[in-house]
Image (spheres, rainbow, N blue to C red):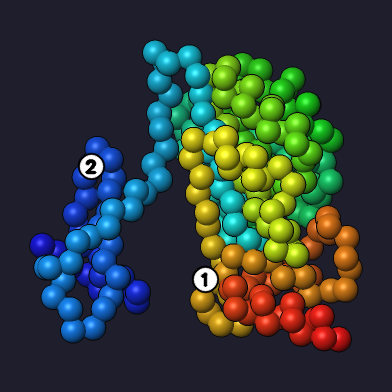
Amino acid sequence: MNLRFDKNFLLLKNVKVSNFYVDLLPVQSNKNYSSLKAEKYKMFLENTVNHKEQFGWIEVICGSMFSGKTEELIRRLKRAQFAKQKVEIFKPAIDTRYHDEMVVSHDANEIRSTPVPAAANIAILAQGCDVVGIDEAQFFDDEIITVCNDLANQGIRVIVAGLDMDFKGNPFGPMPGLMATAEYVTKVHAVCTRTGNLANYSFRKTDNDKLVMLGETEEYEPLSRAAYYNAMKKNQEK
């Protein structure tokens, strides 16, 4: 058996090609690993379009700021474009941080999109598509949940990316509903700027208390649970 040590896990390269299972063992000192039972974690793998099945599905990519959500969205959409599938990408019209008509990740990866003022516009413009991508879904209202499910019921693969929590650590807008109705949910993480651990919180560094405030590294930083708790506690003591 081929073994490779990582920081937190002992990875046993035992992959089932059909289901892409990977075995992970938590690292423990003075343990006989052969006596431990490996837990199976399923890796995400894009489905191909099943022409015998008249229904599509929903994929949600969520996480904090600077976690690679948009980067992963673009990766999946470009793979579909390479396969000559008809792809349309949408984003809320209010998101003009990098470009008016491009979905752009923090590392400058980009793909052309259509800015829309409301989720209802997506239902109209997405007709005839094989794949629909939606970025910054947290900025839409709850109608986006119905739109995504209607598109999936029409046989379209719907890929949605968005923040799962706002700067206060609360579920953000329609994201909980999208995650609940999606067939596939991928949670990605940033790296905490203060501890180096995995970060799943978006901490706002300014005093602005508005729920929606577009920003970058000057306004936000990704924090781990412990770092976020300590930062929020310090803010409350001011």
Residue 195 place in picture, x, y as percent = 56, 82
Q: Is residue 135 at all visible to an observer of this figure?
A: no
Instruction: Choose top left, top right, bottom left or bottom right for residue 231.
Output: bottom right
132 relative to 169 in the view: left or right: left
Residue 127 place in picture, x, y as percent = 66, 17
Q: Residue at x 43, y 24 (%)?
A: 49
The relative height of residue 135 versus residue 188 in the rendered view (above or below) is: above
Residue 21 place in picture, x, y as percent = 27, 48
Q: Nearer the viewer, mark 2 or mark 1?
A: 1
The relative height of residue 198 versus residue 97 in the rendered view (above or below) is: below
The relative height of residue 111 versus residue 229 in the rendered view (above or below) is: above
12 relative to 77 in the view: left or right: left
Tell me which amino acid carries mark 2: Val
Q: Which mark is residue 198?
A: 1
Q: Residue at x 39, y 13 (%)?
A: 52
Q: Residue at x 58, y 73 (%)?
A: 224
Q: Which mark is residue 99?
A: none
| Mark nearer the N terminus (2 vs 1) | 2
98 relative to 53 in the view: left or right: right
Q: Residue at x 34, y 76 (%)?
A: 7
Tell me which amino acid carries mark 1: Leu
Q: Which mark is residue 17?
A: 2
- For the N terminus, give its image quadrant: bottom left
Instruction: Choose top left, top right, bottom left or bottom right for residue 208.
Output: bottom right
The relative height of residue 128 versus residue 60 in the rendered view (above or below) is: above
Q: Is residue 155 at all visible to an observer of this figure?
A: yes
- For the C terminus, give its image quadrant: bottom right
Residue 229 place in picture, x, y as percent = 67, 77
Q: Secondary structure at mark 2?
A: loop
Q: CA distance from mark 2 to mark 1?
A: 29 Å
Q: Secondary structure at mark 1?
A: strand
